[in-house]
């Protein structure tokens, strides 16, 4: 019974856990995009209602609906996972350019420069500092260059608003400060949710690894008990394991002496197994894993995996069955 449980756990498809994590991560991103949609929509409507700048407001609204579009294609984002980070980095660059434009457009007096900090706050949510350091360095550098360039250089080729009056600057600056504070608070919330998601995945993986390890120990004890039932002593067990680990030329003969029925039973399933495949079967019968088998026969892990695959095909072992457990039952 323990073996069956171990077999099911050891053949557990960890892709399911990864898929669950990816699904929850995308759901978190979509909630974040929904937040951006509503807050940008509010900002766009505010500009057209209080300042009458229709053209700029329409441009902002079009950007706002970009977030809604990204939410609508939620099921297709996973298909482009390999280029998703590049797309996100491109979006950061475009938004930085937009901030620089509106900073100049609003006569550098409306507090638009605070939006650079909003972009910086959002980086930890979309990128991992250990894995995505290149993208982070690129985005931070680009934001910094735009911030310094916009602050200290006159950019006369960009247009300036004709709708903002002198008395409007205080109100716009207050709105922008409130906007940045709001995005900062929301960023902190979503970053904490992301960290909780990652911590939960790590904890779940740790529990599964611990369970597999404990059951593996039980399985090893059962294997030893099976050897003992063949009238083998602990010295015999130690001897045959040492012979296997040292790749001794007498190991195969000794193994057949201790397990007289094993090779005939294997050949009854398929008589076309060659010597090297039978040899690996004997090592699996001792419950050696792939790495240990590779060490015993002095070859690469990949070569052992390839041979085990051929053995699996010849013995008709389905992919959902652990080959070591199958061999142990023979």
Image: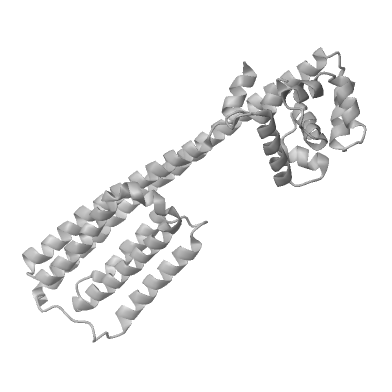
User: Which residue: 57% across, 30% down?
Assistant: 320
| Image coloring type | one colour
Could you tell whether 267 is left or right of 232 in the image?
left
Q: Which quadrant of the figure has residue 147?
A: bottom left
**Toward the viewer: 103 or 283?**
283
**Toward the viewer: 4 or 178?**
4
Is 316 situated above or below 64?
A: above
Quadrant including the C terminus: top right
Residue 224 place in picture, x, y as percent:
77, 20
User: Which residue: 27% across, 71% down?
Assistant: 98
Instruction: Count every numbered label the image shows and give the total.
Output: 0
**Toward the viewer: 301 or 126?**
301
Is 88 situated above or below 15?
A: below
Examine the rendering and report whether any part of residue 176 can be seen. Answer: yes
Residue 126 place in picture, x, y as percent:
39, 55
Residue 60 place in picture, x, y as percent:
19, 65
Q: Which quadrant of the figure has residue 276?
A: top right
Q: Residue furthest front?
A: 272
User: Which residue: 76% across, 24% down?
Assistant: 266
**Toward the viewer: 139 or 151?**
139
Quadrant including the N terminus: top right
Examine the rendering and report whether any part of residue 189 can be seen. Answer: no
Could you tell whether 298 is left or right of 18 in the image?
right
Residue 4 place in picture, x, y as percent:
61, 20
User: Which residue: 42% across, 62% down?
Assistant: 86
Q: Which quadrant of the figure has residue 305?
A: top right
Is 37 situated above or below 230?
A: below
Could you tell whether 231 is left or right of 193 in the image?
right
């Amino acid at each position: 019974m323990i073996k069956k449980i171990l077999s099911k756990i050891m053949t557990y498809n960890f892709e399911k856990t990864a898929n669950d994590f990816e699904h929850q991560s995308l759901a978190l991103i979509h909630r974040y995009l929904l937040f951006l949609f509503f807050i940008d929509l509010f900002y766009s409507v505010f500009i057209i209602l209080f300042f009458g700048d229709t053209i700029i407001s329409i441009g902002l609204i079009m950007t706002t609906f970009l977030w809604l579009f990204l939410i609508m294609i939620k099921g297709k984002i996973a298909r482009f996972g390999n280029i998703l980070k590049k797309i996100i980095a491109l979006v950061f660059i475009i938004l930085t350019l937009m901030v620089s434009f509106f900073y100049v457009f609003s006569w550098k007096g409306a507090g638009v420069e605070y939006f650079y900090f909003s972009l910086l706050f959002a980086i930890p949510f979309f990128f991992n500092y250990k894995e995505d350091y290149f993208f982070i360095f690129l985005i931070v550098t680009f934001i910094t260059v735009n911030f310094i360039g916009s602050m200290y250089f006159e950019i006369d080729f960009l247009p300036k608003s004709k709708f903002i009056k002198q008395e409007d600057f205080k109100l716009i600056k207050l709105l922008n400060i409130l906007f940045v504070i709001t995005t900062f608070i929301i960023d902190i919330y979503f970053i904490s949710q992301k960290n909780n998601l990652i911590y939960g995945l790590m904890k779940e993986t740790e529990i599964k690894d611990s369970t597999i390890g404990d059951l593996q120990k039980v399985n090893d004890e059962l294997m030893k008990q099976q050897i003992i039932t063949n009238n083998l002593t602990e010295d015999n067990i130690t001897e045959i394991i040492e012979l296997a680990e040292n790749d001794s030329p007498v190991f195969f003969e000794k193994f057949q002496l201790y397990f007289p029925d094993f090779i005939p039973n294997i050949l009854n399933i398929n008589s076309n197994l060659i010597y090297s495949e039978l040899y690996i079967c004997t090592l699996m019968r001792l419950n050696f894993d792939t790495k240990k088998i590779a060490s015993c026969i002095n070859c690469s892990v990949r070569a052992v995996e390839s041979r085990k695959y051929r053995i699996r095909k010849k013995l008709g072992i389905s992919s959902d069955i652990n080959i070591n457990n199958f061999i142990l039952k023979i």
